Image: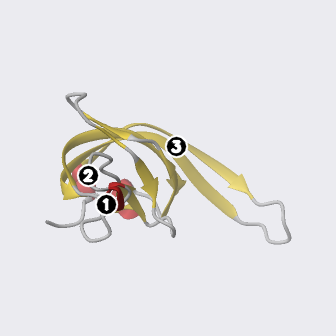
Amino acid sequence: MANLTSTDVTVIEDTIETGQSTGRRRVTRKTTKGRYTLVLGGQGTTTNTIPASALGLTRITNCSSFIKSDNTVIVPATPSADGSLILLCAVTNSTDGSRAAPADFTGTFTGYVEGVV
């Protein structure tokens, strides 16, 4: 398996906002909020990744759960600690120890993602 690429990502809708910090340094930063469809071929962990760059982002700040296109699976998701990846979780894993661990998924999934462009 491999990392997700931009060819496996469709932006359904997005909004780009430009803001400036109010501190001593003036930094202009573009953020986006959007609904994305991801065609996964075994991605979702720190090994087989869903990188921010595949979604056209430099950092992911928030994301929703993702739902499979046939509505049979809902997958909890979160940005990685550094915001470089989306991590997916298989809550149906058989043991308590593995239930909260990142897991790889295959299929077409849709969810909301917020991040820095």
Q: Which residue is identified by label 2?
A: 93
Per the rendering, the mark at residue 33 is 3
Q: Is there CB contact under 8 Å for labels 1 and 2?
A: yes
Q: Which of marks 1 and 2 is nearer the N terminus?
A: 2
Label 2 secondary element: loop
Callout 3 amino acid: Lys
Specify which label sits upstream in the sequence, 3 or 1.
3
Amino acid, disc 1: Ser
Q: Relative to residue 117, is residue 3 drawn left or right?
A: left
The tag on residue 98 is: 1
Q: Position of residue 28 (x, y in %)?
A: 68, 61
Please tell me how crowded label 1 is: few (under 14), some (14-19), or many (20+) other residues with Cα within 10 Å: some
Report how far apart the C-alphas of labels 3 and 1 lie in the structure: 31 Å
Q: Is mark 3 on a helix, strand or loop?
A: strand
Q: Which residue occupies the extreme top position in the image?
A: 71
Label 3: how many Cα within 10 Å (few below 14, some 14–19, many 20+)? some
Residue 58 percent location from the top left of the image: 48, 64
Compared to residue 52, the image places residue 89 above or below, namely above
**Along the viewing direction, whichever of 97 and 55 lies nearer the viewer:** 97
